[in-house]
Image (cartoon, rainbow, N blue to C red):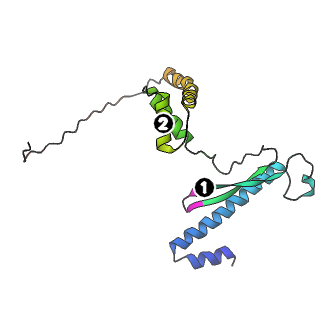
Amino acid sequence: MNDFTKDFAQALFNPDKINDLLRKELQQAVNNLLEAELTAFLGYDPYARNGWNTGNSRNGAYFRKVDTQFGPIEVQVPRDRNGQFHQHTLPDYKQHSDILESMIIKLYSKGVTTREIADLIEKMYGSHYSPAQVSNISKQMIPKVEAYHKRKLSDKFFCVYLDATYLPLRRETFER
C-alpha cells in the first residue's frame, strides 16, 4: 500500500479530511505537471549538464492561488530566464478584466461618462481605471460592436416578445 492509499483509508470517514487530502494531492499533481511542461519547453531536465549555456534556463517560480472544487490550492508556476515560457495547464490569470471591460462597454453605450465609469469601477471593485483607459477600452470595442450589428442573420430566426406588469393589490383592506 502506498502513502496515498493509507492516507485515503484513514480519511475515509471524515469528509473534511478527504477534501484536504485531495486538495493536497491535486496541488502536488499540478505543480509536477507545470514543472514537466517547463522541462518539455526547455528540452532538458533540471540540473542537466546539456542545459548549460543554452541561452535559456529555469528562473525560479511565482506562486498563484487557484480555486478548485476541493478548496483553494497554491501552485508554483515556473519561469524561464528569457520569459518565453507560457504554461498551458492552468487558465490565464484574470483579475476582473473581462467583467470590467464588459461593464465599461455597457455603461459607455448607455451614455455614462468615462469619469463616472472610472469612479463606479473603483468603488465597486477597487480597481483604478483612468478616464483615458475607459475611453481606450471603448475605442477598441467599437469595431467589434459594429461588426456584430452588420452581421448577416439567418432566415430561421424567431422572435418571442414577453411583457409583464406586477401590481400588488390588497383587496380586503383599505389604507389611507
Q: In the rendered image of this protein, does residue 140 appear above or below residue 17? A: above
Q: Which residue corresponds to the image point at 89% horizontal and 45% vertical from the top-left? A: 55
Q: Are marks 1 and 2 in contact (CB under 8 Å)?
A: no
- What is the secondary structure assignment of the residue under circle 1? strand
Q: Nearer the viewer, residue 114 or 155?
A: 114
Tag 1: amino acid: Val
Residue 75, picture quadrant:
bottom right
Magenta stretch encompasses residue 68? yes
- Picture coordinates of residue 26, whole percent (x, y): 64, 63
* Nearer-N-terminus badge (1/2): 1
Q: In the rendered image of this protein, does residue 2 appear above or below residue 62? A: below
Residue 143, picture quadrant:
top right
Q: What is the span of residues highlighted in magenta in the rendered image?
A: 66-72
- What is the secondary structure assignment of the residue under circle 2? helix
Q: Which residue corresponds to the image point at 86% horizontal and 54% vertical from the top-left? A: 44
Q: Quadrant of the C terminus?
A: top left
CA gap, disc 1 to disc 2? 29 Å
Prevailing SS of the magenta stretch: strand
Q: How many marks?
A: 2
Q: Which residue corresponds to the image point at 84% horizontal and 58% vertical from the top-left? A: 46
- Picture coordinates of residue 139, whole percent (x, y): 56, 25
Q: Residues within 10 Å of mark 1 (few under 14, many from 20)?
A: some
Q: Nearer the viewer, residue 37 or 158?
A: 37
Q: Which residue is mark 1?
A: 66
> What number is the disc on residue 125?
none
Q: Quadrant of the N terminus?
A: bottom right
| Residue 105 left/right relative to 87 | left
Q: Which residue corresponds to the image point at 48% horizontal and 33% vertical from the top-left? A: 117
Q: Which residue is mark 2?
A: 119
- Picture coordinates of residue 59, whole percent (x, y): 80, 52
